[in-house]
Amino acid sequence: MKTFSLKNTEVVRDWVVFDAADKVLGRFATKIADKLRGKDKPTFTPHVDGGDFVVVINADKVKVTGNKADQKKYYKHSLYPGGLKEKSFKEVLESSPERIIENAVKGMLPKNKLGKSIIKKLKVYSGSEHPHESQNPSEWNPKI
């Protein structure tokens, strides 16, 4: 029996909607990363982008445990001397809540060309509406 290896031309992609309301950030991000990468499919091949498109709604309602809302920091650098800026979880949640989920998921993907192509399939929105209704996405509620 030969080992199955998925090819780029054989990939079948679906659209899935995740609702981030009252979900814990890290556990929720692992489920999204697995879905984007295709690890939940029996045809998973590590070197092929075989995952689905993921739409995340209600990103502004994601939760963190403990004191992370005050202590967790997000850093950004302007590439100029002294250009390091930091924001707390609460500040980022108010200004751009989509960035929180994008950063968490991106950290769980491969750090190469494959990871860059996978992260492009993630669409995050802060409200409960999204513009991807024409793709007929299915609802997916992971048990977290």
Image (spheres, helix red, strand yellow):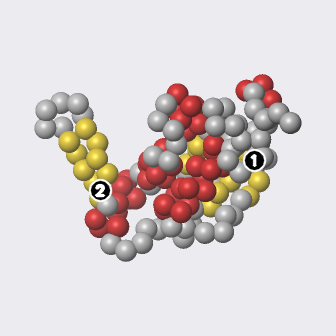
> What's the mark number on residue 73?
2
How many numbered circles does the render carry?
Answer: 2
Q: Residue 118 in the image: x percent, y percent? A: 59, 36
- Looking at the image, the residue that sits furthest to the front is 1
Going by the image, does 91 lie left or right of 60?
left
> What's the mark number on residue 133?
none
Q: Residue 123 in the image: x percent, y percent? A: 59, 44
Callout 2, which amino acid? Lys
In this figure, which residue is indicated by the disc labeled 1?
Answer: 41
Q: Quadrant of the N terminus?
A: top right
Name which quarter of the figure residue 50 lies in: top right
- Looking at the image, the residue that sits furthest to the right is 1
Q: Residue 3 in the image: x percent, y percent? A: 78, 35
Mark 1 and mark 2 lie on one chain; the one further toward the N terminus is 1
Element class at badge 1: loop
Going by the image, does 16 lie left or right of 67?
right
Whether residue 61 appears in this view of the structure is: no
Q: Residue at x 52, y 28 (%)?
A: 113
Going by the image, does 82 lie left or right of 100?
left
Q: Residue at x 64, y 37 (%)?
A: 46
Distance between the alpha carbons at the discs numbered 1 and 2: 34 Å
Q: Residue at x 40, y 59 (%)?
A: 93
- Looking at the image, the residue that sits furthest to the bottom is 66
Q: Residue 106 in the image: x percent, y percent? A: 48, 44
Element class at badge 2: strand
Q: Is residue 60 above or below residue 105?
A: below
Q: Residues within 10 Å of mark 1 (few under 14, many from 20)?
A: few
Q: Residue at x 29, y 67 (%)?
A: 70
Q: Quadrant of the C terminus?
A: bottom right
Callout 1, which amino acid? Lys
Q: Is residue 2 above or below residue 20?
A: above
Whether residue 125 appears in this view of the structure is: yes
